[in-house]
Image (spheres, rainbow, N blue to C red):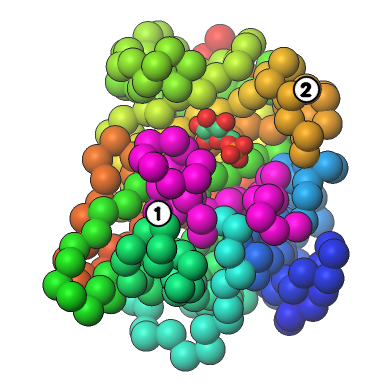
Amino acid sequence: HLCKGVNGLEKVLLRESRGSSAEVYLYGGHVTSWKNDHGEELLFLSSKAIFKPPKAIRGGIPICFPQFGSHGTLEQHGFARNRFWVIDNDPPPFPTNTSSRAFVDLILKPSEEDAKIWPHSFEFRLRVALGPGGDLMLTSRIRNTNPDGKPFSFTFAYHTYFSVSDISEVRVEGLETLDYLDNLQNKERFTEQGDALTFESEVDKIYLSTPTKIAILDHEKKRTFVLRKDGLPDAVVWNPWDKKAKAMADLADDEYKHMLCVEAAAVEKSITLKPGEEWRGRLELSAVPSSYCSGQ
Ligand code: BG6
């Protein structure tokens, strides 16, 4: 269902038969809501989010393409997150392994203006689907359609903002002992020590060559988010904490406590496509009730 969202921007509502749902704005190809079958919101969306170009929506799942962060010469996180995507009613077949009927296909192609800042022709197809158990699945397919034989390279992230009860009570499992680049220390490389990650100050790290499965345990909510990813070797972990949050116009001062970004990404090694080649990057999110035993 296509309907009007904030500021009259168009959004697509997806609803799965058991009651889970999702909302996708055409602006940014941006998932802003994902609810389980009890109607509980699972993604964080800022109360101060600005739904107006060229500002990207603060929260949900912004798509970072063709550049992650400031790793290049383009605007921060590239331009896909602040362009208007269109619904693609006749996409080439997806070899999907789900029987989902609740899905939408979007497509982004560069405008003439875009081609001036990134001189390449591409087709970016995004499928957002809800699985029968309420899982949220995003599949991106990016094709080089350059007519002149030129390859292109890009970096990418699904910049997912998870809703958490209290950031100080959250742990992330699956990234311990890995190498990371620390954005807060000139992108220097370090190795994560010890146990599951916990949070007590600002964090902005790019974990490298991560496992396909990462878990976020929310002690208070008794909920575990499980991320499964494919084609996306890195994982960015970000929380602005109090000072940076205060400096952000589109985030309320205390909201950093209720969000955590864990982003399936391809950052360290950019992806190169020759004309006619297609890259695929997939993210599957599930939210399951958990029992948390501290110290384990
Ligand atoms: C993270 C980056 O992915 O996104 C951070 O690692 C950045 O460095 C954050 O601050 C938010 O970016 P933006 O452009 O949405 O404010």
Task: Note whether 79 is above or below 276 in the view shown.
Answer: above
Q: Amino acid at mark 1?
A: Pro
Tell whether position 66 is magenta: yes
Q: Position of residue 36 (x, y in %)?
A: 72, 55
Task: Note whether 254 is above or below 287 in the view shown.
Answer: above
Q: Nearer the viewer, residue 167 or 18?
A: 167
Report how far apart the C-alphas of labels 2 and 1 lie in the structure: 28 Å
Query: What is the span of residues highlighted in magenta in the rendered image?
Result: 52-80
Specify whether 237 is left or right of 202: left
Report the residue marked by disc 1. Answer: 66
Q: Position of residue 238 (x, y in %)?
A: 55, 28
Q: Residue at x 70, y 58 (%)?
A: 53
Tell whether position 241 is magenta: no
Q: Secondary structure at mark 2?
A: helix
Q: Nearer the viewer, residue 197 or 181?
A: 181
Q: Position of residue 122 (x, y in %)?
A: 35, 71
